[in-house]
Image (spheres, helix red, strand yellow):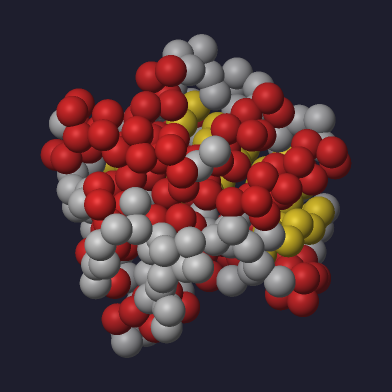
Amino acid sequence: MTKTILITGSTDGIGKLTARKLAAGGHHVLVHGRTAAKVEAAAAEIGGSVSTFVADLSDTAAVAKLADDIRGAHDRLDVLINNAGVLKTPDPVLDSGQDVRFVVNTFAPYLLTQRVLPLLPQDGRVVNLSSAAQARVDLAAMRGQTRLADMEAYSQSKLGITIWTRELARSHPDGPVFVAVNPGSLLASKMVRDGFGVAGKDLNIGADILVEAALGDRFSDASGAYFDNDSRAFADPDRAALDASHSAEVMSVITEFAC
């Protein structure tokens, strides 16, 4: 059965390769990126049945418009893969004072997910890109009141998306499925090259697990779970994500800003 699948950040890296695999399988892929030129180029390379959407995920108004555009163009969305992410950038502080890692990696996918949820059927799926790098969240930094080093902000933002994955799964027991996935450490993406200065491992490692998370039976009843592709198994996330008090504090900040 053909599915309609939105992949944020699908103009390069794991996102684009995942889009290519899904489009080659006959699915309709919604390609998203920050600029029209990159989106159109990626769509041409991906091929198959695609739609294109442009939005800067560091701008919550643009995220809201993206959701509106998707809802205006489609009456059903089977899978949302929240893939877009930021690790290292020359100026990580936005005009709002917030750290772009928290905005793009945590707040934006939450806002987008909430706004397109009416399109997702009970057997739909929301696949969130987490990471092996997760760390307890500094709530002041999440609010933009203090500054963090690149890896600190990134790992805390990934704990944030893992936490809200679990919370939305809990609040939607009848579906869709919400799952957080570490696609694999140090894969050959631009993020890894820029952030760590290494070539990285085969991107297919990450793309293949995202395709499985989107379509495979193993993930059909895994709502609220975390999949660690380094160990190729479901696993516990960082223990801070299992701390009910900390999770509640993080959710309070997420809902404060992602509105």
Residue 28's spot in the image, x, y percent? Answer: 77, 46
| Residue 243, image quadrant | top left
| Residue 79, image quadrant | top right
Q: Quadrant of the N terminus?
A: top right
Q: From the viewer's perspective, is 128 left or right of 37?
A: left
In the image, what residue occupies the spot 45% across and 14% down?
A: 173
Q: Quadrant of the C terminus?
A: top right
Which of 10/67 is in front?
67
Q: From the viewer's perspective, is 239 left or right of 139?
A: left
In the image, what residue occupies the spot 53% across and 19% down?
A: 175
Residue 106's spot in the image, x, y percent? Answer: 42, 49
Residue extending furthest toward the top: 174
In the image, what residue occupies the spot 41% across and 73% down?
A: 92
Residue 250's spot in the image, x, y percent? Answer: 30, 38
Q: Is the residue 14 above or below the residue 61 in the image?
A: below
Instruction: Kindly tell me whether residue 257 is visible in this rendering.
Output: yes
Residue extending furthest toward the right: 73
Q: Is the residue 192 above or below the residue 142 in the image?
A: below
Q: Is the residue 239 above or below the residue 89 in the image?
A: above
Instruction: Kindly tell me whether residue 187 is visible in this rendering.
Output: no
In the image, what residue occupies the spot 18% across and 28% down?
A: 245
Could you tell me how many numbered marks the image carries?
A: 0
Residue 101's spot in the image, x, y percent? Answer: 40, 62
